[in-house]
Amino acid sequence: MKRFWVLFTIILLFGATLAGATEEVRVTSKNVWGDTDRKINYLEGEVRFVQGTTIITTEKARINLDRNDAVFEENVKLTHTEVRIESDILEYDFKKKVGTFKKNVVMDRIKTKATKDKKGKDPFKLFTDELYFENDTKNFTAQKGRIEHKDFTGEADLIEYHDARQELSLVDNAKLIRPKGEVINGKVIKINISDQSFYVTDAVSMEFEVEETE
């Protein structure tokens, strides 16, 4: 009964304290302790944050109530509309609803069906060691990563994605690999995932196989 009361109190306090971050934030955890002077709280064990449609789970978290931000560590998972992200570390701003994921980052862009007003969106998977993600727009920037789509694999030192346009940019040491073995290299490769078109600039090279006829 005592543990239930502790969890319930945390939900109420954080809901009130972080209400300035546009939406209420609800938090549950097995253990919590804090520094009242610095307004910093530490949570450990089955930590769960809920802000609107965003759910973050982890094993450890440090929250700064003055700045409305937090650092999550160990088995970090963020679930948001159409997106799932896992990493070792997440630095998250509750007010701006943006986060930087670090170490062993894997992002799944979930498939969505077309409607009268919106085009459908293909699923893809991103692998990187650092990802900056905007919750509201679903835009992201990844440092040195790889993206896997059913129709291509892309690699680059920098990967940028604009969700509304479904536009993917591979920047610096960019490589696009097509299903039949075609490999395209360039400084910048822009891919429109919606219509499967691409554009390559600077130092373009292409490799492909030609079947020999007997």
Image: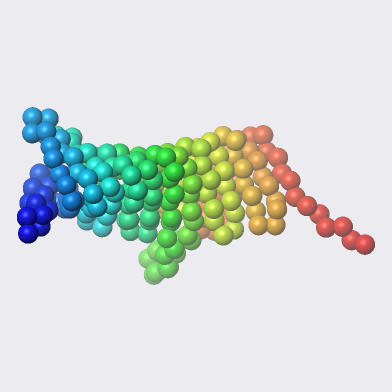
- Quadrant location, the C terminus: bottom right
**Left or right relative to 61: residue 4:** left
Residue 70, position as x, y percentages in the image = 24, 39
Q: Residue furthest top?
A: 37
Residue under the image location 15 percent in, 39 percent down: 41
Q: Tag count in the figure?
A: 0
The image quadrant of residue 151 is: bottom right
In depth, the one of 101 and 170 nearer the eye is 101
Residue under the image location 51 percent in, 38 percent down: 144
In depth, the one of 144 and 29 nearer the eye is 29
Q: Is residue 212 visible?
A: yes
Residue under the image location 8 percent in, 47 percent down: 13
**Left or right relative to 139: residue 179:** right
Residue 132, position as x, y percentages in the image = 38, 41
Residue 61, position as x, y percentages in the image = 24, 42
The image quadrant of residue 93 is: top left
Residue 86, position as x, y percentages in the image = 38, 50
Residue under the image location 65 percent in, 41 percent down: 185
Q: Is residue 114 depicted above or below 22 in this figure?
A: below
Q: Is residue 141 visible?
A: no
In depth, the one of 189 and 59 nearer the eye is 59
- Quadrant location, the N terminus: bottom left
